[in-house]
Image (cartoon, grey):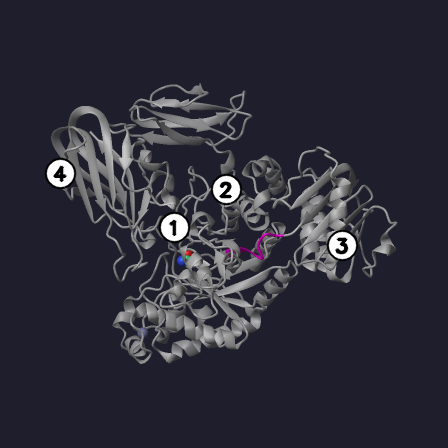
Amino acid sequence: MCRFFILIIIGLSVFSNGFTQSIPAIIPTPISTIQKEGHFELNNETILYYDSASINSKNFLHSFLLQHYKIKLKARSYNGDLKIINNSNNTIVLHKQVAENETYMLNVEQNKIIIEGSESGVFYGMQSLIQLLPTEISNKKIPCLTIFDAPRFGYRGLHLDVARHFFPVSFIKKYIDFLALHKLNTFHWHLTDDQGWRIEIKKYPLLTKIGSIRSQTLIGPYGSNKYDGRKYSGYYTQSEIKEVIDYASKRYINIIPEIEMPGHSLSALASYPFLGCTKGPYKVMETWGVADDALCAGNDSTYQFYENVLDEIISLFPSKTIHIGGDECAKTKWKECKVCQKKMKEQNLKDEHELQGYFIGEIEKHINKKGKKIIGWDEIMEGGLAPNAAVMSWRGEEGGISAAKQQHEVVMTPGTPLYFDHTQSINEDSVTQGGLNTLKAVYNYNPIPEALMPHETPYILGAQANMWTEYMDNEKKVEYMLFPRIAALSEALWTKLDNKNYNKFEAKISTVFARYDLWKINYSKAYFDVESHVINNDSGKIFWHLISKNKLGKIYCTAPNQSEKQINEAFPISQSGEYKAILKDEKNYPLSSEISQTFFINKATGKPISISVQPNKSYAANGSKTLVDGIQNKMGMPKSAQFLGFWGDDVEVIIDLQKEMNVDSILLHSFEQKASWIYRPKEVTFLLSIDGINYTQIVENPQISGNSNLIYSQKLSSKARFIKIFIKNIGLIPENNPGSGNNAWIFIDEIEIK
Ligand code: ACM
Ligand code: ZN
């Protein structure tokens, strides 16, 4: 290690010469990059020297250059003594050093490139070298520079759910390469869920014979009842699993397998109904969400079965950590099950949450006995955290904060912003799950919460993004949801906080996209979308503000029944109807897809509004003004940009119409989706006032229409200047529902006064 750091210091002092050049588009940004004059030119005569510890790096580089640049390096092994190749020209040297794990130095000179570091460090240095290559394959010049680099976090993860949709080994390998190209080191393979069991277990063949098959799949939004009517199946044999593990290990990627229990287990229950409380019959699930059925936690044979399954998992996967799920386990059946209730009595457990804690604890004991440790979703904290368990915090960061304070290891993976099944564009036209997680939000994510004391932060091992595939039935869609957010993720996990800078990241995006084109990746171009937001300056007028990061074009806007106009500033919205916008070049050629927005103008639109509590930061949209911005959520799924979400809170809203007016009706838009813990308000009350001091309660619990998009409305014949709306949350989610016992969300959107 010492020699390595001496090298670095010398490097810094020799090359810090103020030489200016555009910063190479290396993602994630290294600790230090010192640019120098000149370049190294790669050709078919370039010799790639590698020592015995660098074979994996040699193989990756060799096949990458062949595949993407049609260059065939002459690879030669050497004994690790740098002196032997000191005088060689046109060489790339991969050299394992005594260095801290994952650390590397990359030195590009005109006649030689040397990558030194720990074994995995050399691999990461080689990844940086790949990103120094130009994106036009005819140009093979690599700029001279010196990079020293090491990661911020030891756990840099990406997950893939192969239960909702199955992906073949060829794609899993490609996915693992995506991780490697971004210096991620952990692949969380979500192998079982209600919708399918995807790994061969020799002792229990029905898990795949029955559990890997479902009759059909939900293709519309949750609750839409829109199914494809097609049988769906797929699983990995154990020999395929071994092949993937070997592939990943050559890329310094650990695979954490996840076997879900005791909830999210319908595929196992359908295969072996004795595992359940009611004994079935059960069906592999066709929709996503939370099922009422779980494994019977009272029956000893359930534990025996899962221990046998885990024994096969443990002997397959070298990972020190095994993921045992633990999330969203409905307690419905446990409450009615005599065996579960008996177990609770025997073990002195006060409720079903403690039974869940007992279940996880028993499984942990077995896994610990085999020399491994468990990680689980943050619900494993229910009824007390198992002694050695690590926690994956997905329902925000609270679970992770609490676990770190209890001195347990934590991987942060909060739904906002790290769920990649959520859309990255407010203009998304494919069906997606959840809210909006933009490239910028992912980039700005910091896995270390402010709530932790310095001595608690080492328990945060790192973070990962989760790719739930509810609506990803093909590889191209997975790529589209992953790219370019994986680039932002890699900086959030690798790059030191001082070096993180979104503007600098943005400056690299064009190069990054060109690289994706070279790699033939299907990526989202949402970054260049025409972005719109409503300006509401409390004057009673609203404006549609449109911008694009693509400066090559101009934005054109079309108002209802009018012709297209080029706009430079915000576009005034004076009437209800559909407005359209598009980016075009000077020849009128479209540079973006067209976006459209329907506005509903009423007496409340653009008026001053105040709110008693701020929305939760995950669903804060544009603050209280969102409720009077003329935009109504029209989709079955909430576009989070248009909703305010309150987690457990009651809310009071006051709108000032700025003068006394006739009020003929009041409407409040809300949303309900119990699978996502979003509940209709318990009470809605409308109040009116002339002076803003004395309010008359005019309506309690107005009429409700709609299904999941709810409208609370009341016809009136009154005069008022101020309208107050009181919205009461139901509080805790009732028993026998997904998330029972947690705070319920209320989602509110537009308020209309007519
Ligand atoms: C989860 O998203 N249910 C872990
Ligand atoms: Zn039971």
Q: Are the residues tagged 1 and 4 within 8 Å (C-beta)?
A: no
Q: Is residue 637 left or right of residue 522?
A: left
Query: Where is 2 relative to 314, above or below?
Result: above
Mark 1 or mark 2: whose residue is earlier in sequence? 1
Q: Residues within 10 Å of mark 4 (few under 14, many from 20)?
A: few
Q: Is residue 76 left or right of residue 220?
A: right
The answer for how far apart the CA atoms under marks 1 and 2 are is 25 Å
Q: Position of residue 256 (x, y in %)?
A: 53, 63
**Label 1: which residue?**
219
Q: Residues within 10 Å of mark 2 (few under 14, many from 20)?
A: many
**Label 4: which residue?**
697
The part of the chain drawn in magenta is 151-159
**Label 3: which residue?**
94
The answer for how far apart the CA atoms under marks 4 and 3 are is 77 Å
Query: SS of the residue at dot 4?
Result: strand
Regarding ligand 1, which quadrant of the image does it lie in?
bottom left
Q: Are the residues tagged 1 and 3 within 8 Å (C-beta)?
A: no
Query: Where is 219 relative to 627, above or below?
Result: below
Tell me the quarter of the picture where residue 197 sits.
bottom left
Q: Does 156 appear in magenta?
A: yes
The answer for how far apart the CA atoms under marks 1 and 4 are is 44 Å
* Dot 2 beta carbon under 8 Å from ligand 1: no
Mark 4 or mark 2: whose residue is earlier in sequence? 2
Mark 1 or mark 4: whose residue is earlier in sequence? 1
Residue 115 shows in the view: no
1 or 3: mark nearer the eye:
3
Image quarter of the N terminus: bottom right
Q: Amino acid at mark 3?
A: Leu
